[in-house]
Amino acid sequence: MEQKLYNVKEVSQILKVNVHYVYSLIQQGLLPALKLGSWKVRAEALDNFLKQYECYDLSDLSNICKSEYYT
């Protein structure tokens, strides 16, 4: 069973955000990750994160809410 693992830099490139934001997502428990020397995110976990938070405004992680464009 082979599963794709992304490092934080790869996740930041996929999400088009900076690496500090990815670390914040991991630290807040919003994006599940594994500490294997450095943080790794399973492709499945990233897909689930994107599905779960679709239509949400994540610009302020202490105040996550539905985006006004999708209400």
Image: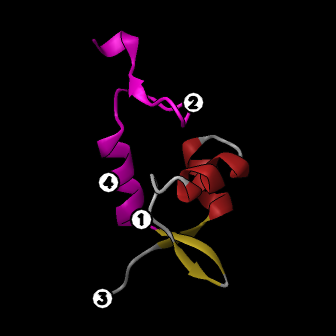
Distance (Cα) linking label 4 and label 2: 20 Å
- Element type at mark 1: helix
The quarter of the picture where residue 65 lies is top left
Which amino acid is tagged 2? Asp
Which amino acid is tagged 3? Met
Would you say the residues marked 1 and 3 are in contact, meaning their CB atoms lie under 8 Å apart? no
Foreground label between 1 and 2? 2
Distance (Cα) linking label 1 and label 3: 13 Å
Q: Which residue is mark 2?
A: 60
* Nearest to N terminus: mark 3 or mark 2: 3
Foreground label between 4 and 2? 2
* Nearest to N terminus: mark 1 or mark 3: 3
Distance (Cα) linking label 3 and label 4: 19 Å
Distance (Cα) linking label 3 and label 2: 36 Å
Distance (Cα) linking label 1 and label 2: 24 Å
Q: Which residue is mark 3?
A: 1
The quarter of the picture where residue 71 lies is top left
The quarter of the picture where residue 39 lies is bottom right
What residue appears at the point 36 percent right and 85 percent down from the top-left corner? 2
Q: Position of residue 66 (x, y in %)?
A: 35, 22
- Element type at mark 4: helix
* Nearest to N terminus: mark 3 or mark 4: 3
Would you say the residues marked 4 and 2 are in contact, meaning their CB atoms lie under 8 Å apart? no
What residue appears at the point 56 percent right and 72 percent down from the top-left corner? 40
Q: Which residue is mark 4?
A: 48
**Residue 64 - label:** none
Q: Position of residue 62 (x, y in %)?
A: 54, 35
Q: Which residue is mark 1?
A: 43
Horizontal side of residue 9 vs 58, given as left or right: right
